[in-house]
Image (cartoon, helix red, strand yellow):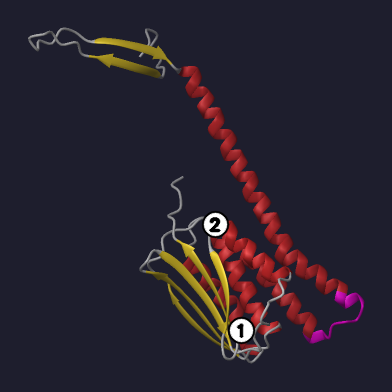
Amino acid sequence: MCKDGSTVWTDVIACLPISADSTFLEILGITRDISERKQAEAVQRQRLAERSRMQEREQLLQDLHDGFASQLASACLRNEYNMLTSAEMGELLHECLDDLHLVIETLGHEDLNLNDAIADYRYRCERRLSGLGMQVDWDIELSDCPPLEQRILMNLLRILQESLNNAIKHAQARQIRIAAWCHSDGELRIAVCDDGIGLPAVPKMGRGLANMQRRARDIGGRLDFTPQGPGTQVSLTLPLRPAPTA
């Protein structure tokens, strides 16, 4: 407290000298005004917050580019060269809308957890999958999953989405099983299994698979492709880390 009634931040160093007979003598201390340092720290925090917001916007733009914009551009190009039937065009437009909803709902709700995020994604795509004659079994046990950052949620959903699309489009699967659970060893595991034609012995890392691998690395996870008889299992293993407190 200053004489004029205002307050300032101070740094205090104090000691208690004791005599030879263990008698308390006095308090010796130094008090230093650190107002300028606190102001500098506040400026630094503001800059970090602005940088974080910039990174979130860049992430949003990247996700829009990788998903919605990429698929929409592909649909426009293929339609221009009459490479799509009306049914195929309708399917592509539905995928574009799914991508847009995924980005908006994930990044637009700060309190969204993984269990609810997967439930929302399931609701959006289940009707389309049923229309394609797909049999999809969902085994989701994430009630004990700790809160995750929006960036991690987005990448998890993107990997799940890409795995499902690959099973439908490329593997020509008819049955798919999606499982997600928090393991007792402190890891989150998500697996997508299909009964399709499977991957070659040496999978070609196209754009889709490369993006999935990159997303897994970005969040500190591991992505594995395991042949099955028949079909393929795509599994993601992620060490769980609680989201930082704001």
Q: Residue furthest right?
A: 81
Q: Which residue is mark 1?
A: 127
Q: Is residue 177 magenta?
A: no
Q: Position of residue 126 (x, y in %)?
A: 58, 82
Residue closest to the far left: 21
- The residue carrying mark 2 is 150
85 to 143, vertically: above or below? below
Left or right: where does residue 122 sit relative to residue 13?
Answer: right
Q: How many numbered marks does the figure carry? A: 2
Q: What is the x, y in percent for residue 180?
A: 47, 74
Magenta range: 78-87
Q: Is residue 115 above or below residue 16?
A: below
At 57% from the left and 39% from the top, the residue drawn is 49
Residue type beneath disc 1 = Arg
| Residue type at numbered disc 2 | Gln
Observer-nearest residue: 169 or 1?
Answer: 169
User: Which sits in the foreground, 47 or 221?
Assistant: 221
Chain-order first, disc 2 or disc 1 = 1
Asked if 200 appears above or below 37 in the picture, the reply is below
Q: CA distance from mark 2 to mark 1?
A: 26 Å
Quarter location, residue 34: top left
Mark 2 or 1, which is nearer the eye? 2
Quadrant of the rendering where the N terminus is positioned: top left
Mark 1 neighbour density, 10 Å: few (under 14) some (14–19) many (20 or more): few
The reply to whether the magenta stretch includes residue 85 is yes
The secondary structure type at the circle numbered 1 is helix
Q: Are marks 2 and 1 in contact (CB under 8 Å)?
A: no
The answer to whether 1 appears left or right of 163 in the picture is left
